[in-house]
Structure formats: structure tokens, C-alpha cells
Amino acid sequence: MDALDILTDLDNVFPYFQPIFSADEHRVIGYEVLGRYRGSDGVASSLGPFFQDENIPEEYRIEVDYEVLKKALDKARDLDKDILLFVNRDADLLMYNDGEQFLNTLQEYEKQGISLDRIVLEITERNYKGDIDHLDHLLNYYRTYGIKLAIDKLGNESSHLDRIGQLAPDILKVDLESMKSNASAYNFNDILYSLSMLARKIGASMLFENIEMVYQLQFAWKNGGRYYQGYYLQKPAENFTDRDILKEKFRSECHRFIVHEKKKLESLYQVTLEFNEKMIDFANKNKNKKVLVYEETLEQIAVLLDGAAFRLYICDEDGFQKSSNYFKRDGEWITQEEYLHKNWSWRPYFLENIMKMRINKKGILSDLYTDIETGETIRTFSFPLNTNDYLFVDLSYEFLYNNEGLL
């Protein structure tokens, strides 16, 4: 694709629209505007490489960019008044004229019935070279007009979290392309968890893009995705689609996701119930012992939970470890005395879980997390042995793998 051909043939520059679907309505709630160019062969090619080519002067890329935007807004006048338009902008190009051209263009079309609160600005600033404070001022200025802000290109890096917190965008756009690589899937899950927690804190919705398979849709649904887009759902097209085109498909697949998740939750509940029953029986048999001999207690519990546990220890309600670690290594149980008296109250949810156990008088099964010492994915079962002693049992990856619904 030759840049000069595009610049001298703007009649053949036009927008494509990729539908964005919502989890709560199961219908199209917006479109991402994409640039296309139809060459002499009649094939419509993406203008992405043209916009990203820094060898092409900024004013030329901007001219083509606004040609696409104006044609998209012309077509969008006939859309339902609640449909959003997602408009991509590189931060450097947006700031070219202090951002005035973008706002002026939108205000022209506001007079024609396209409300500014229907515009979602997808900003890409990964390689932004300008003054970040100047950019932030401009973005906040746009938002006073009702323009929404989405942060683009998330999911392949983790260094953007502080920036997201600073901007507090309306939408976080997560790229599922990185899920294709098994090597990066592990890190991706950690990054996604951080993003979902941050989104909840700042009141942002999560949009998952590049959904190409059903398992990716399920992944997005499970991880708090409110909006979805990708070839599995609908490819970009020159014209708008029926808003309810996937309503029945969404309903059916969402039902399957719900059934699967409920089975998993039932498995977690059942395992928790079984562990509680064993530990309640153990505690009742030993309730007359005035002094708890920790090493002896852990040995007995290790036998009781054989095949499930690989580490056991006992703490008080403030998180101070009252026993050594009882740790299974190469099939043999060993005592790790160096852990005695360490404090774990700094761990997320530790004190909250202690309080739950103290009040409810029963054990808790944790979510999945990575063990610092072994590097494996595990869960921890914790249980109140008495009013002073709280047992923690780390469950092995092998046990979780062999029990459906625990991973």
C-alpha cells in the first residue's frame, strides 16, 4: 500500500465498523470505527499500517484519519441514539493541533444529532513523546463534554497500571491476542486479575477484543468482561448489523458458561464441606486436651488429609505462626523450624478470613494463587482449631488437578 496513492485517492478511503456486544443485553451496544482503503484491485485493505508509519508526515496521516472519521459519523446519524462509537486515536496525532480538530469535528456532528456522550475515545499512548500532563488536561477537557475514555492495547504489558489509575478511564480494553501464546498465558492471568481489581476500584467497564474462539468468550465472561468484540462474534463490515443478531447465540452460550461455573462452585463447596467435616471431627476428639502439641497435631492432620496437603502450620489470630511448617518433600514429611514465629497478617484477606472463621466456626477454602516457595498453583484451606489456634493447609497442585472444578 503506497501512502501517496491513498493521499491522492481519498474517495476510496472509508470506514469499516466492528460491532461491540454487551454481556448484560446480549446485543450490539456500539461499533469500533476502522479505516479501510479500496485499491485498484477492489480489495479493501486496513489503514492500520498507514496510521502507524511514522515515516509518513503527521499532517498526512491526520488528513486520512479525519476522512475516515467524518464518513463514519455521516453513516452513524441513522443509528439508534444509544449506540456508542469507538474512535481510535494515537496520542501524538491527537495532540497535533492541541486536540482542537478532534473536538471541533465532533461538535459539528453534534448539531446533526450525534451526542458527544456516544463517543468513546480509544487512546493509544504507549509511545507518546509529548508532555503527559498536557495530554491528561486535554483528555479531562474532552470528558467535560461527555466524551468517554477507553485505554487501548491492554493485556500484553503490565507496566500501565499506574497510568490507568491516574486517568481513571470509563473502559479498559483488554487484548486477548496474547492468549494464543501458552508461554504468556500464565503472566496474562496475573495481569488480568490486577486489571479487573483496578477496574472495579475506579468504576471502569472491561472490554475484551480479539475474541476468535468460544473459549476466549467464556474467559472474558468469567473475568468480568462487560463488552466483547472479535471475529468469533462479528467481523468488521462496511455496514451496520442487526443489533440482535447474536442474541440467541449469546443466551445459549452464556447459559453453558453459567452451568459450567456453577458445577465448579459446587465442587469447591463440596471439598470445603468435606474438609470441614474431617476437621470438626478431629477438633471434637481433641477438645479435652488442655495443651495443643503443635507438632503432634500437624502429624495427625497430615495423615487425615493424606494426598491433599503438602504444607501445614498453625497461627494465632494476629497471624503469628505458633508451629513450624510441616512440609512434604519428595514424599517425606519434614519440619521447617525457620518459619516459627513469622507473621502473615500482611497477606491479602488474612485478617478478614480469621474473622470469618472466628464468627462462623468453620473453615475456608482460598482462591487459586501461586505459592512463593514451590511456584505451583495452589489453594489453602484454613480452619479454627479453637479460639486461639488457626490451622492452614496448603493443597497441592496435583490434588487440585485430580479433582474437577478446583483449578
Image (tube, rainbow, N blue to C red):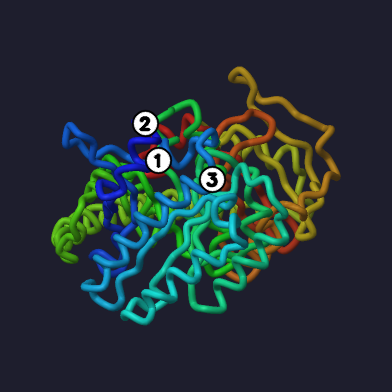
* Real-space Cα separation, disc 3 to disc 2, in angstroms: 16 Å
Which dot, 3 or 1, sits closer to the camera?
A: 3
- Picture residue at 65% right of the left edge, 60% below the top: 135
CB under 8 Å between callouts 3 and 1?
no
Q: Determine whether the residue tagged by mark 2 lies in a helix, strand or loop.
A: loop
The crowding category of the residue bearing disc 2, from other C-alpha atoms within 10 Å (few below 14, some 14 to 19, many at least 20), is: few
Instruction: Find the residue positioned furthest to the top.
Output: 330
Who is closer to the viewer here, 236 or 315?
236
* Real-space Cα separation, disc 1 to disc 2, in angstroms: 13 Å
Between discs 3 and 1, the one toward the N terminus: 1
Q: Which residue is mark 2?
A: 2
The crowding category of the residue bearing disc 3, from other C-alpha atoms within 10 Å (few below 14, some 14 to 19, many at least 20), is: some
- Picture residue at 34% right of the left edge, 76% below the top: 114
- Picture residue at 29% right of the left edge, 53% below the top: 15
Between discs 3 and 2, the one toward the N terminus: 2
CB under 8 Å between callouts 1 and 2?
no
Q: Determine whether the residue tagged by mark 1 lies in a helix, strand or loop.
A: helix
On the image, the x and y values in percent for residue 53 come to 49, 35
Q: Which residue is mark 3?
A: 58
Query: Which mark, by number, is residue 221?
Result: none
On the image, the x and y values in percent for residue 206 come to 45, 59
* Real-space Cα separation, disc 3 to disc 1, in angstroms: 14 Å
Quadrant for the C terminus in the image: top left
Left or right of 349? Residue 176 is: left
On the image, the x and y values in percent for residue 279 come to 56, 51
- Picture residue at 63% right of the left edge, 46% below the top: 128
Who is closer to the viewer here, 20 or 144?
144
Query: Which mark, by number, is residue 48?
Result: 1
On the image, the x and y values in percent for residue 40 come to 20, 34
Three-letter residue code for mark 1: Gly
Q: Determine whether the residue tagged by mark 3 lies in a helix, strand or loop.
A: helix
